[in-house]
Image (spheres, grey):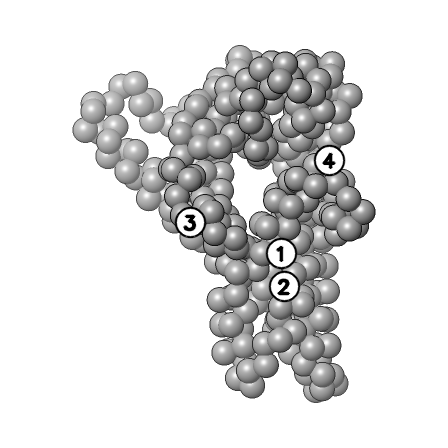
């Protein structure tokens, strides 16, 4: 059985797992039962998913859309009592509600993206401009900007990790990683085996974001426009390219295990100590349900 790598992410009280063009989200409902929803994505064998760097840009956008969609699905189980009961709606009303939800999802994604660009890219850039009168070297100023950016990100992650809801999400993040590591180790996917597996993984969204920030430090050193706004625009324009390069590194790190790859993977793995926490057994069960919905781990183990 060919194995190209299972990917996933944590959602509200649940785990999303993706294998090829198929993904599933498993959620622990308020009644403690596990709900599993399986869907197919667009064709991943088209030319855009085969071109280096470009495929990273496409996958990044695709992951954002799927991630927000699965997050809304998991959140639907925890809506307030006065929320709309879809079972009482007509087909026309249901269609209208779904369109409204998709529009809200698109709006949320747009606002989240703008805020992320403002906080993690524009803000460090403008802070670094305050040092412009003291530092004449553009590359050095860009390097300091990168350090400020990474510091803001680490501080942000450290701060939200103390929030109860976020902490539970990070525990589900741990369940996701431990399930994937269990499968990739060739062990039967049981609660006991998953519990013994490591919670850290090279192919992680946290590592991806951190690699984006690290690569941006060096890429932005070569932007030499004199105009302040043009320089900021160039930074924002290069983000998709940097994301594509980062994707190639994460892809490489997931496939190979050598000293060079391991050294460059260390910073992302260290940061996972903040974003990936040890799950309880119920969370592990949700992770297992998500994996089994998209991947036949028994066949995979038999083929090893």
Q: Earlier in the sequence, mark 4 or mark 1?
A: 4
Can residue 95 be seen at all in this image of the molecule? yes
SS for dot 4: loop
Residue 254 drawn above or below residue 55: above
Image coords of residue 76 (percent x, y): 44, 28
Q: Earlier in the sequence, mark 1 or mark 3?
A: 3
Dots 2, 1 in contact, CB < 8 A: yes
Image coords of residue 238 (percent x, y): 52, 65
Q: Residue 87: name its quadrant.
A: top left
Q: Which residue is mark 2?
A: 216
Residues packed near mark 2 inside 10 Å, few (<14), some (14 to 19) or many (20 plus) = many
Residue 225 drawn above or below residue 125: below
Q: Residue 219: name its quadrant.
A: bottom right
Q: Left or right of 26: which side holds 158? A: right
Rounded to the nearest angstrom, the CA distance separating label 4 from label 1 is: 19 Å
Q: Left or right of 269: which side holds 230? A: left
Q: Which residue is mark 1?
A: 212
Image coords of residue 176 (percent x, y): 63, 29
SS for dot 1: helix
Foreground pick, 296 / 226: 296
Q: Residue at x 51, y 30 (%)?
A: 19
């Amino acid at each position: 059985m060919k194995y190209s790598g299972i990917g996933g992410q944590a959602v509200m009280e649940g785990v999303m797992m993706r294998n090829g063009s198929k993904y599933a989200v498993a959620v622990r409902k308020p009644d403690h039962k596990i709900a599993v929803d399986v869907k197919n994505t667009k064709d991943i064998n088209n030319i855009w998913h085969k071109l280096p760097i470009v495929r990273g840009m496409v996958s990044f956008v695709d992951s954002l859309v799927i991630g927000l969609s699965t997050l809304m699905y998991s959140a639907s189980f925890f809506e307030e009592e006065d929320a709309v009961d879809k079972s009482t709606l007509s087909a026309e009303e249901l269609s209208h509600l779904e369109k409204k939800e998709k529009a809200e999802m698109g709006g949320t994604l747009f606002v989240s993206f703008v805020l992320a660009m403002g906080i993690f890219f524009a803000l460090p850039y403008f802070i670094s401009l305050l040092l412009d009168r003291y530092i004449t070297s553009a590359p050095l100023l860009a390097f300091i900007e990168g350090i400020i950016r990474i510091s803001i990100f680490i501080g942000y992650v450290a701060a939200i990790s103390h929030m109860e809801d976020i902490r539970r999400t990070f525990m589900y993040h741990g369940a996701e990683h431990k399930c994937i590591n269990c499968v990739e180790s060739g062990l039967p996917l049981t609660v006991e085996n998953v519990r013994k597996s490591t919670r850290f993984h090279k192919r992680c969204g946290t590592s991806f974001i951190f690699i984006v920030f690290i690569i941006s430090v060096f890429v932005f050193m070569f932007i030499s426009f004199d105009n302040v706004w043009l320089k900021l625009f160039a930074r924002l324009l290069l983000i998709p390219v940097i994301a594509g390069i980062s994707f190639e590194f994460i892809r490489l790190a997931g496939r190979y295990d050598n000293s060079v790859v391991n050294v460059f993977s260390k910073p992302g793995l260290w940061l996972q100590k903040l974003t990936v926490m040890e799950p309880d057994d119920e969370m592990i069960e949700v992770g297992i349900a998500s994996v089994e919905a998209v991947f036949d781990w028994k066949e995979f183990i038999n083929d090893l």
